[in-house]
Image (spheres, helix red, strand yellow):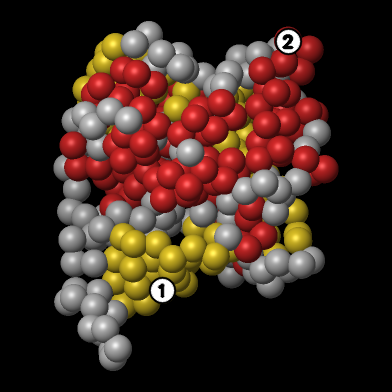
Amino acid sequence: MTGRHGRPGTGLLVIGDVVTDVVARYGTPLAHGTDTAAEIRTLPGGSGANAACWAAHTGCADVRLLAGVGADARDWHAERLRRAGVRARLVVDARAPTATVVCLVDATAERTLLTDSGAALRLSPAVWSPELLDGVGRLHLSGYLFFADTSRPLALAALASALERGVPVSVDPASAGFLKELGADRFLAAVEGAETLLPNADEARLLTGLPHPADAAAELSRRVPVAVVTLGGDGALVAERGAVTARVPASPARAVDSTGAGDAFTGAFLAARLGGADPARAARAGCRAGARAVEIPGGRPAPAPAPE
């Protein structure tokens, strides 16, 4: 991991999405065509932003975020990220609102997402500069960037710059639904050169066509040096060089909302890797963060209190 002029970098740069989450938790089946009682909260979210916040929360002292927002919620998100310890560069899009996701969370803590990507996937290569990697030891790309024609060139430009500088790159495939629309072959071709892939089990199956997560993890590790497949309540699998090298159990948790659990895993995993942990030890840190994430509403750790 090297920064500018070959010096080791210690920072984490995340390029991804900032989202306003509307989280609706309900305990009974949805009543079609009428009311269902729910607890509803508006919270800051986004896969990339969540991962950045969890990386800062779990010990990474230099976490940076590049993301697109609308003018409607820029200040609110900027303040929440600052309080989380993330140095955010939020690019305001004058033609689109901040992305919004409605998270429907049922009694089992499973979530279903209704997504309006808004400004999140309208970032273009014009906002990219290789100097954004100065002092960076790892670059993480949210997979959502690869699903839109506007933001995909930005992701590819950042990936190319990181490879040129010798900065390892990780990618979270992000969404089984959007991944299926794009196609596994196109996605894998786009992320060629990445050091680490961080799919969940459904995404790993889609990327490989293999039904068993362990087989899928092993296959993905023939495409990238490290593949880490998250399994929810069953922990995670680490694969390297075509074989599963670690099976990490989940940490105990009383789940209330699974929103952002994968982002928490990613953030803690990357913070641990920057701290010198091998993939298996980093995956254990990720599982601990994922367990904490499912015990709280929304996708982020509690921020520092606002100044009075």
In this picture, is 276 found above or below 71?
Answer: above
- Identify the disc placed on residue 6: 2
What residue sits 48% from the left and 47% below the top?
181
Identified by mark 2, the residue type is Gly
Q: What residue do we see at 73% from left, 10% from top?
A: 6
- SS state under label 1: strand
Query: In terms of sequence position, does the residue under pointer 1 or pointer 2 come before the other?
Result: 2
Q: Is residue 96 left or right of residue 266?
A: right
Looking at the rendered structure, the kind of residue marked 1 is: Arg
Kindly tell me whether residue 16 is visible in this rendering.
no
Observer-nearest of 49 and 288: 49
**Residue 288 appears at what percent x and percent y?**
29, 37
Q: Where is residue 148 in the image (x, y as percent from the top left)?
A: 62, 48
Q: Name the residue under label 1.
A: 41
249 versus 254 height, above or below: above
Question: In the rendered image, which quarter is residue 81 located in?
Answer: bottom right
Q: In what element is the residue under mark 2?
A: helix
- Viewer-closest of 269 and 110: 110
> Can you say which quadrant of the picture contains the C terminus?
bottom right
Position of residue 85 in the picture relative to residue 250 (left or right)? right
